[in-house]
Image (cartoon, helix red, strand yellow):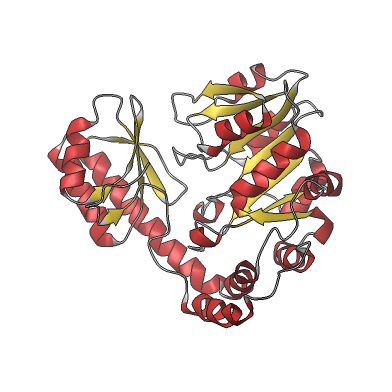
Amino acid sequence: MAAPESARHLLAQNEHPYPPLPSVLAALAEAGADLHRYPDFRPERFAGIVADWQGVPAGQVVVGHGSAGVALDLFHAVVEPGDNVVHSQPCFDAYPMFCEIARAEARPVPLGPDARHDLAAVAGRMDERTRIVVLCNPHNPTGTVYSWAELTEFFRRVPATALILLDEAYVDFALDWRAPDVPDRIAEWPNLVVLRTLSKSHGLAALRIGYALAAEPVARRVRDHQVPYAVNRLQEAALVAAVAAEDEMARRIAGIAAERERTGAELRRLGWAVAPSATNFLWVEAPGDHAPLRAELERLGVAVRYYPGQGVRIAIGEKDANDAVIKGFTAVRP
C-alpha cells in the first residue's frame, strides 16, 4: 500500500486533501503544553463531548484509537475463537485482520454487480455462530451506498445474537443520504453499532480519533475491554475544535464532493466504468491488467490503490491531482 517515492499526488489512502483547519491547529498547539500530563484514565470527558455532539447519552458512546481501534475493541468484546464474522469482499482491509486477531472465521461475501453489498448473499452466510456482520455504508472501496430503507430491510434478517457493525467512516460525504438520527436508530435496533471517524471528512487521520454509538449494554461491554488512557490530550483538543468548526468543514466537504463529481464525469466520458460514489474517492472498474495504467499514473506522480483483477480506488485530491488522474486515464483507454 506504500506510495511510490516519486508520488506527488497521494490518492491511495482516501486522505483529506487539505491540512487541518487553522482553529484545530491552534488548539493542538495549545494542548501541546500539557503533554507531560497523563490524559484521563477513562475517557469520560472525551465521550461526553461526542455524546453532546451526536445527541446521545454518554453511556451509548465508545471512543478510541481511530474507528479501526474502536472496531477492534468491539471484536475483542464479543467474538470468541470459533465464532464467525460476515463481511463483503473487497472491504476495508482491517476487518479480515481483526478476524485473524480474534481467531474468528472470516466469511467474505463478494460484492454484487452494482459494486454494492450483496445483502441476500450476506444474509445467507449468517448462522448461530455469527457475532458481527460488517456493513460499510458508504462502502470502502467502491463508494456505493444503500438507503436506510434497504438497510433496515436487511437488519430484520440479522439474528439478535449478532451485532450489526455499520461503518460510516465516509457518511459525511454522502450529502444526499438520509437516515433517522442515531438515537432513534439505536432505539429501534439494539444490536446496531454505528462506527465513525474524524480521519476522513475532518482531515485528522494522523490523530486517530474514532467513536462508536450503540445501545448502552453493548457500549459498556466494549468499554470494559479497552485499555486505560485510550485517548490523549491532543485528540481531545482536536475534537473540541473540530466540532466547533462544523460549518467550515462542511464547506470543505462540499468542495471535495464537487471535485468527485467532476472527476467521475470525466472518467466516464473517457469510457471507464465508475461506480456512483458517496465518499471522497472513486471506484473505477478495471478487471484487466493494471500495469499500463499504473505506469502512466506513476509517471504523472499519482499514487492510487489497485485491487488486482477488480478495480482502482482513487481518493479525491486538489484540482491539480484530479487533473493528473484524468490525464493518466486518458492515456490508457479501457
Q: Is residue 201 visible?
A: no
Look at the image and tell me in which quarter the N terminus lies: top left
Observer-nearest of 282 and 264: 282
**Could you say where residue 148 lies in the image, as x and y percent from the top left?**
64, 41
Q: Is residue 31 visible?
A: yes
Question: Above or below — where is 165 with respect to 6?
Answer: above
Direction from residue 1 to residue 177 in the image, left or right: right
Instruction: Give the residue drawn at x 67%, y 55%.
Output: 64
Direction from residue 33 to residue 290 in the image, left or right: left
Q: Quarter-wise, where is residue 132 in the image?
A: top right
**Could you say where residue 121 lies in the image, as x and y percent from the top left?**
59, 19
Question: Above or below — where is 137 with respect to 14?
Answer: above
> Of all residues shown, which one is farthest toward the front?
36
Direction from residue 24 to residue 77 in the image, left or right: right
Question: Above or below — where is 46 with respect to 279?
Answer: below
Instruction: Give the residue drawn at x 42%, y 68%.
Output: 19
Observer-nearest of 60 and 152: 60
Direction from residue 109 to residue 288 in the image, left or right: left
Question: Above or below — where is 234 with respect to 134?
Answer: below
Instruction: Give the residue drawn at x 51%, y 51%.
Output: 174
> Of all residues shown, which one is farthest toward the left?
331
Instruction: Give the residue drawn at x 49%, y 54%.
Output: 173
